[in-house]
Image (cartoon, coloured by chain):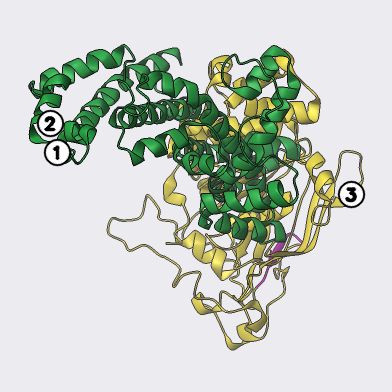
Amino acid sequence: MSLLSVDELTVTFTGRGTRDVNAVSGVSFSVDEGQVVGLVGESGCGKSVTSLALMGLLPKRGVRVGGRALFRTKGGGSTDLLTLGRSALRDLRGPQLAMIFQDPLSSLNPVVPIGVQVTEILARHRGMRGKAARDQAAHLLERVGIPDPTRRLREYPHQLSGGMRQRALIAMAVACAPRLLIADEPTTALDVTIQAQILELLKELVDDQGTALLMITHDLGVVAGLCDDVNVLYAGKVVEAAGRRPLFAAPAHPYAHGLLGSIPRLDSPRGEPLNPIRGSINDTIAWGDGCAFAPRCDFYTLACLEGAPALADLPGAEPAAHLVRCVNPVLNEAPGAGDADDAGADTESDTTKEASA
Amino acid sequence: MLRLIVRRLLQLIPTLLGLTVLLFLWIHRLPGGPASALLGERATEADRRQMEEALGLDQPMWVQYGRWMERLVQLDLGNSVRTGQPVWEEFTLRFPATVELAVTGILIAVVVGIPLGYFAARRRGGWLDVTAVSASLVGVCIPVFFLAFLLRAVFAVNLGWLPSVGRQSTGIDATEVTGFFVLDGILTGEFDASWDALEHLILPGVALASIPLAVVVRITRASVLDVLGEDYVRTAESKGLKQRVVRGRHVMRNALLPVITTVGLLTGSLLSGAVLTESVFSFNGIGSFIRTAIDIRDYPVLMGFILFIAVIYVVINLLVDLAYSLIDPRVRVN
């Protein structure tokens, strides 16, 4: 059994007087121990909401969460993260389940020294106090590449650079060696060279500790450089799920195909127009009426409008190795970009960012 | 931190100097000038001139200002027209009562208001929230003197739970040390005197606290709601911290910043509110003294009072700034 298996997760925002909004409408995926799984999609596709739902960090009011998220705990038992009580969840967060957030400045408490923000988690889950906790915190900061850690412990977030703040957040997340780390766009707020360093650091930590990583991103370069398995999200559903290689070599869903095709290439001639996906995420239809991507799709037929397509094996692929939610999948054709290794080499380049705009 | 304090203290000097200039100009712009104010309506022109000479008002302005300042730094605020006693002595006699009352008011506002605002925010839209928000609206709207009359009528006259007037029961034989009766009782070990003074403080204190309490509840509520939506609170939750730690270290520490500023500003208005409350409860503080001074245009007293209040305001502002920089490292200047 996987470390985490998410089954038909739904998140609905209900507001008084307004129409319900389905932010996540039936997402399923799994993460094995030590594996790096990517959750990819453009802004508003439900990837951050998915991660918050798993951590139990969504507000209680005005939100309806459905489905199951089975997590295998250290003892070997398995619990559903979505129905777990508050205090049980608090015990899990930190030593078993941890999260790295998007904006390191706003995610750190401005009026509490970095040291306290690191040691408080050690005090809570490891019972460490005083000098022992401070030493361990300094060790953690050093490990995530913060120079002069004992001085930094006394400083406040506004005294640190952006990259260092993100490193500090990572240090907090890995402080108790969690088994699953959720990283919600950890590099979005950073400049490109720092992005590469942070990704390198995450890779190292995952390799050292055997921590599984759920990487939430809109950056295909990050996916190519880091992830073992990739789930592509569109309008609150997984539309394609495959290993990194098959996905980058032969994306089957027209959306994934379009995403990879939209990446500008350095070797393309000057002046050649970019190759975006038509329309925007707002040009959509409800999954109940058909494929939500249909209005933007180059391949759509009337069959696309007969209810939501099922997430099914790609014809010709091994069972469960490459799943796609499409009635007209794109077969055996790599879009403009090359294979996975090529894309992987571009990790540091922001030219690989999804051309959703 | 020490450098910050010293620098802020030095910054007080120009502020206070500007204040004395303004006050001095104000007293000179009075219709007819201070001499005719002192002499009253039936004075003749000759009387006025004689008085002006006696007071040195025929001298150039800057000479007059210099003399006044010279006396001011020696804490000589002149003599009260009504009692003939030095203004400074009149103040030191009465101020402890007012300060005691104002402190009681602010304590009630803070001790009740902050938790109330916090829980109203936690259970937003719940019965506590709705009650607190509407009660605070009523609290702001009711005039202090009316509430004072109401409280006295109900709790002192009808129910007889608390004393209705004064600072001390007549039978109490208390030693006076500082003039702060509650403190005096504790210092001398006469706890019954402390308790008695406290009982006398409750009703006027509550009346006086009504507006600050309402403001503190609202500010705290809004501020907590703001902070609860912050990313760093979510981070704290994601670390699995105990609720106590999340609330104390991560929510309240940030949420209190605007509350501190507000409480500082309220303290000033509290002193003026004390004037009305004191007269309802025949509380022998500075309030009733100032009211008579206004009635008979006792200018030395009024000038002294304005200066005094202004200094208190400035000092409270300084304390607020220091408290702020103690909590929020971002405003500390390196």
Instruction: Please report the residue visible at 28 percent of the width from the left and 17 percent of the height from the top.
Output: B72
Chain of the residue under label 2: B
Q: CA distance from mark 2 to mark 1?
A: 9 Å
Instruction: Please report the residue visible at 70 percent of the width from the left and 68 percent of the height from the top.
Output: A314
Q: Amino acid at mark 2?
A: Arg
Q: CA distance from mark 1 to mark 3?
A: 90 Å
Q: Nearer the viewer, residue A200 or A139?
A: A139
Chain of the residue under label 3: A
Q: Name the residue beneath numbered marker 2.
A: B48
Q: Residues within 10 Å of mark 2 (few under 14, many from 20)?
A: many
Q: Name the residue beneath numbered marker 1.
A: B32
Looking at the rendering, the stretch of residues picked out in magenta corresponds to: A320-325
Q: Amino acid at mark 1?
A: Gly
Mark 2 / mark 1, whichever is N-terminal: 1
The image position of residue A306, as x and y in percent, is 66, 86
Note whether B41 is above or below A297 in the view shown: above
Give the chain coloured green.
B
Q: Amino acid at mark 3?
A: Ser
Judge left or right: residue B91 versus residue B133: left
The image position of residue A180, as x and y in percent, is 74, 42
- For the question of whether residue A227 can be seen, the reply is no
Chain of the residue under label 1: B
Do badges 1 and 3 share one subunit? no
